[in-house]
Image (cartoon, rainbow, N blue to C red):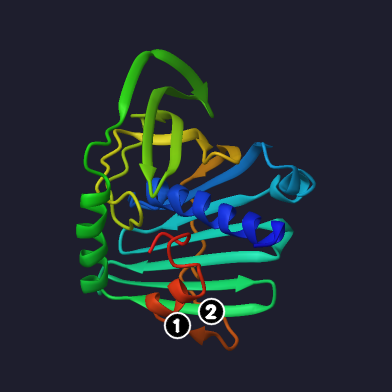
């Protein structure tokens, strides 16, 4: 696997965890996040650190609909995930270096993933330390930690969550059995060869009226099985 492919898989893996924790439902609003620090132990990936900085995620929601936009590598990769509460259908549109791919997951598909994730997450729990606190965007936050190991790959997170923003679960992927108290406004994700820090940059009750409009253009629709054959399914959180 080339260093570029390794970086691509790592970015998707990291951001799929991010979407799992933060792709959630409030009454209405927009929450923006950005990467503030990236570190790697891989000499192959060291030269690509610059392209990872500036990565961002935007979550938009109105109670019945939700869109999560992940922008990576200076716009070369963009993933938009739409969740409709009325149908419980999730649509993901991926623009990746010239490729346009679309996936659709029904409520039944998500229930199956939920059961699989329940088995995967057994024995893993979040630990909280309310004595370790900090202010982020004026919100009082305290520390939470999480560690897991899947197929020999260790993954850990240090998060600072606030209870001033109540966000019940709605759209979930890898961590859909993990109930996080409060809303994380900063988290450090360590996936072994890469360590990345995300932090909230803006929280607003404003929401664009057309936020749920789907991307235009031709997208090749693929199933989860086809994505897995490309070596991408697991990294995308499916």
Please give left or right for residue 36 compared with residue 139 in the image.
right
Most foreground residue, 60 or 196: 196
Q: Position of residue 69 (x, y in %)?
A: 53, 60
Which residue is found at the position 46% from the left and 76% from the top? 229
Lower sequence index among marks 1 and 2: 2
Q: Position of residue 227 (x, y in %)?
A: 46, 74
Which residue is found at the position 74% from the left and 48% from the top? 44
Q: Do callouts 1 and 2 mark residues in contact (Cβ within 8 Å)?
A: yes
SS class of the residue under badge 2?
strand
Please give left or right for residue 45 compared with residue 186 in the image.
right
Please give left or right for residue 78 compared with residue 206 in the image.
right
Residue 132 vs 37, above or below: the answer is above
Residue 38 vs 13, above or below: the answer is above
Residue 160 vs 94, above or below: the answer is above
Q: Position of residue 188 (x, y in %)?
A: 52, 33
Which residue is found at the position 29% from the left and 33% from the top? 181
Please give left or right for residue 85 compared with residue 21 in the image.
left
Residue 222 is tagged as 1
Specify the quadrant that holds the C terminus: bottom left
Specify the quadrant that holds the N terminus: bottom right
Residue 140 is tagged as none
Residue 101 is tagged as 2
């Amino acid at each position: 696997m080339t260093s570029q492919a390794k970086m691509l898989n790592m970015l998707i893996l990291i951001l799929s965890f991010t979407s799992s924790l933060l792709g959630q439902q409030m009454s209405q609003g927009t929450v923006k996040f950005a990467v503030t620090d990236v570190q790697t132990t891989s000499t192959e990936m060291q030269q690509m650190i610059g392209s990872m900085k500036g990565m961002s995620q935007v979550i938009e929601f109105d109670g019945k609909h939700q869109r999560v936009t992940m922008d990576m590598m200076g716009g070369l990769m963009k993933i938009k995930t739409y969740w409709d509460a009325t149908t419980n259908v999730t649509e993901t549109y991926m623009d990746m270096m010239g490729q346009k791919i679309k996936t659709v997951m029904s409520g039944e598909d998500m229930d199956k993933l939920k059961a699989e994730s329940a088995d995967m997450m057994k024995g893993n729990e979040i630990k909280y330390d309310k004595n370790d606190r900090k202010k982020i965007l004026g919100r009082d936050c305290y520390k939470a930690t999480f560690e897991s190991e899947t197929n020999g790959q260790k993954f850990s997170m240090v998060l600072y969550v606030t209870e001033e923003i109540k966000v019940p679960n709605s759209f979930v992927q890898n961590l859909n059995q993990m109930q996080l108290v409060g809303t994380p406004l900063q988290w450090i994700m360590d996936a072994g060869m890469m360590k990345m820090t995300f932090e909230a940059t803006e929280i607003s009750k404003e929401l664009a009226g057309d936020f749920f409009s789907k991307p235009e253009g031709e997208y090749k629709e693929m199933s989860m099985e086809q994505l897995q054959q490309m070596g991408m399914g697991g990294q995308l959180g499916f």
